[in-house]
Image (cartoon, grey):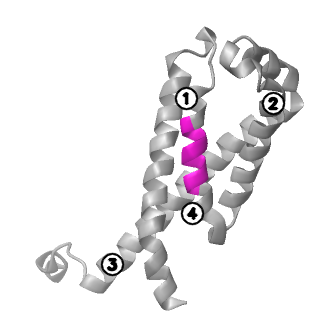
């Protein structure tokens, strides 16, 4: 029993590297899962109720001219992001695309009813997408060495 406490909690270097890789992969999977749920929800609501989205976009002069195109384009782009996040080979593109779409969501007008909670949630998802994309970009050259 004393030998367990004498050795301490430090792991061998190989095990530390493996644990770090597993934690990175877990973070990437969780980030992709959260973003996939977000895109599935928003794409489905956008495709099922395009009239509400069109009315919301038409209220603002800048978006009024493009509202007809944006009503279909934004939910389809969200569905594409969902598809990219679903596969490990395209996950990096999906993460960068998700970050771009989250940045776009700050430009699209919001109603006052949405409140600060939705804005905070979008900021968290944008940060999650960015950090996951950066981790994936750092991991990509390492993964190519072993394939």
In the picture of the structure, the residue carrying the numbered disc 4 is: 92
C-alpha separation, residue under disc 2 versus residue under disc 3: 46 Å
In the picture of the structure, the residue carrying the numbered disc 1 is: 106
Q: Which residues are magenta?
A: 95-103
Asked if the residue under mark 4 is in contact with the one under mark 3, i.e. CB atoms within 8 Å, the reply is: no
> In the picture, residue 87 is in which quadrant?
bottom right
C-alpha separation, residue under disc 1 versus residue under disc 3: 38 Å
**Farthest bottom residue?**
146
Q: Secondary structure at mark 2?
A: helix
Which is more N-terminal, label 2 or label 4? Answer: 2
Which is more N-terminal, label 1 or label 4? Answer: 4
C-alpha separation, residue under disc 4 versus residue under disc 1: 22 Å
Q: Which residue is at the front of the view, 87 or 2?
A: 87
In percent of width and height, residue 137 lies at 46, 66
Q: Does 88 appear above or below 83?
A: below
Circle 1 or circle 3, nearest the eye? 1
In percent of width and height, residue 78 lies at 72, 44
Asked if the residue under mark 3 is in contact with the one under mark 1, i.e. CB atoms within 8 Å, the reply is: no
Q: Does 108 appear above or below 8?
A: above
In the picture of the structure, the residue carrying the numbered disc 3 is: 17
Q: Secondary structure at mark 1?
A: helix
Q: Badge 1: how crowded within 10 Å, few (<14), some, or many (20+)? A: few
Position of the N terminus, as image quadrant, is bottom left
Which is more N-terminal, label 4 or label 3? Answer: 3
């Amino acid at each position: 029993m004393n030998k367990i406490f004498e050795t301490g909690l430090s792991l061998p270097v190989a095990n530390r590297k493996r644990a770090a890789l597993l934690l990175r992969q877990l973070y990437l999977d969780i980030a992709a899962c959260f973003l996939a749920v977000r895109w599935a929800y928003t794409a489905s609501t956008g495709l099922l109720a395009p009239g509400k989205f069109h009315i919301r976009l038409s209220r603002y002069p800048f978006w009024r001219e493009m509202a007809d195109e944006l009503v279909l384009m934004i939910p389809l782009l969200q569905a594409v992001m969902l598809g990219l996040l679903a596969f490990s080979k395209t996950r990096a593109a999906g993460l960068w695309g998700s970050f771009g779409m989250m940045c776009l969501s700050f430009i699209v007008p919001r109603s006052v009813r949405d409140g600060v909670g939705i804005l905070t949630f979008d900021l968290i998802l944008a940060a999650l997408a960015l950090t996951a994309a950066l981790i994936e970009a750092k991991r990509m050259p390492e993964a190519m060495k072993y394939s």
